[in-house]
Amino acid sequence: MNSVWSGFVRQCVAAAGMILGLTLILGVAYPAAVWAISRVNTAGAEGSQVSDAAGCPVGSTLIGVDPRVEPGTPDPYLHARVLGAAGEPMATGDPSASAASNQGPNSEVLLAGVTARRELIARREGVTPAQVPADAVTGSGSGLDPHITPAYAELQVARLARENGRTPAEVRGMIDDHTEGRQLGFLGQPRVNVLEVNLALGHAPPGCRAP
């Protein structure tokens, strides 16, 4: 009987030791290691926030939100891509409404949306529909791209210069300053960060408010 009891005690002690050891490894050491690694790139870990001159967060370099103006009012913004699944052609890139359209290349719904966007953008920029680049009229999977192609940015230069009291050369300089090249020199395509250009133009979203 004593041997049975002592064996039972040894098994309980071993089990308790195993639980304690795994708790320390998986419940403390591993989460602490993951947290420590995340601190290597603090800006990325905190959502790559962009701050205004006062240090208040005004957006993210990773999440694009297309600014919107009231119909008939001056439009001084550089615009991003639109939401792919939005019910209206020029819906803003609201993160809460992010979704893909799930429409295939032969979809009449997709074609109608692209055609409507192309006509609206062409009218806004004073160009022909054929001059509107593909990324201007198609949404990404997330609908929250922070970047556009240099071609779409160039299409908007004339309007940006006119509505912001700048010269086209000044606007192109701001766009060039916030254009990123290919990753590692060969991956992806050159891209323009929309939020950073709008901030350079002086259009910051509302910053921190005093309590």
Image: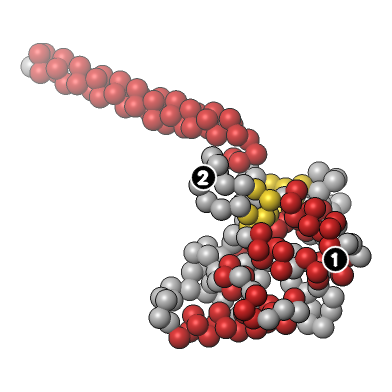
Say how the picture is coloured: secondary structure
Amino acid residing under circle 1: Ala
Q: Measured from the top left, where is residue 134 in percent x and y?
A: 57, 70
Image point (52%, 51%), residue name: 188
- Residue tagged 1: 161
Amino acid residing under circle 2: Phe
Cα distance, mark 2 to mark 1? 32 Å
Is tag 2's residue or tag 1's residue first in the polypeptide sequence? 1
Which residue is farthest left? 1
Q: Measured from the top left, where is residue 175 in percent x and y?
A: 75, 55
Q: Measured from the top left, where is residue 208 in percent x and y?
A: 81, 52
Left or right: 210 with respect to 71?
right
Say what secondary structure mark 1 lies in.
helix
- Residue tagged 2: 186
Q: Considering only vertical position in the picture, is 1 above or below 171? A: above
Say what secondary structure mark 2 lies in.
loop
Of 196 and 175, which appears nearest the observer?
A: 175
In which quarter of the view is residue 73 placed?
bottom right
Name the disc covering residue 97, or none: none
Residue neighbourhood size for the residue with mark 2, other residues' Cα within 10 Å, grouped as few (<14), some (14–19), many (≥20) = few
